[in-house]
Image (cartoon, helix red, strand yellow):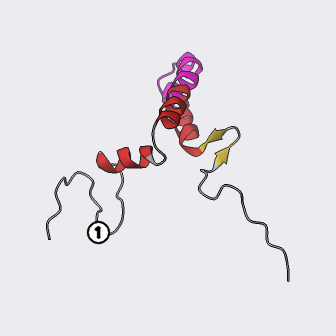
Amino acid sequence: MNQVEIPRFVDSQLQFFWWEMDEFLVAASVLGLSIIMHLVWLAFLGIPSLVKLLKMFKNSSLPGGLLHIAYWTGVSGMNRLFDDGLIRGFYK
C-alpha cells in the first residue's frame, strides 16, 4: 500500500506569493487601474490599504462571507437552482 499525502487545509484559498487569491485580485485590479489612469502613485497607497481592509473584513466575518456578499448582490450565482441572487423570494 502506498502512502498518500493529504493536505492539511483542504478549504484554504489558493495562495499567490503571500496573498490569498481574492486579495491578489484586489491588488491587481488597483494596479491595473492606476496604470491605465497614469496614477501609479495610487497603487503604492491603494494596494496596501485596500488589502489590509479586506483582510480585516475577512478575519471579522464568518468563513464564506465574501461569497455570500457576491451572491446577495447578484455578482455570482450559488448553484443551478438559485442562479440569481437578486431574487429575494423563491416560490415554486
Residue at image position (59%, 50%) is: 13
User: As drawn, which residue projects farthest toward the left?
Assistant: 91
Compared to residue 42, the image places residue 88 above or below, namely below
Label 1 sits on what residue type?
Answer: Leu
Compared to residue 73, the image places residue 50 above or below, namely above
Q: Residue 5 at x, y = what percent?
A: 79, 67
Helix, strand or loop at mark 1? loop
Q: Residue 84 at x, y = what percent?
A: 26, 57
Residue 27 colored in magenta in the image: no
Residue at image position (71%, 57%) is: 8
Look at the image and tell me in which quarter the N terminus lies: bottom right
What residue does disc 1 label?
A: 81
Neighbor class of circle 1 (other Cα within 10 Å; few <14, some 14-19, many 20+) is few
Q: Residue 49 at x, y = what percent?
A: 54, 22
The magenta stretch is 33-50
Number of numbered discs present? Answer: 1
User: As drawn, which residue projects farthest toward the bottom?
Assistant: 1
Residue at image position (79%, 72%) is: 4
Compared to residue 44, the image places residue 51 above or below, namely below
Q: Residue 47 at x, y = what percent?
A: 56, 25
Look at the image and tell me in which quarter the C terminus lies: bottom left
Residue 45 colored in magenta in the image: yes
Q: Is residue 66 left or right of residue 10?
A: left
Q: What main secondary structure does the magenta stretch of the protein show?
A: helix
Residue at image position (36%, 53%) is: 76
Compared to residue 53, the image places residue 85 above or below, namely below
27 or 86: nearer the eye?
86
Q: Is residue 24 left or right of residue 8?
A: left
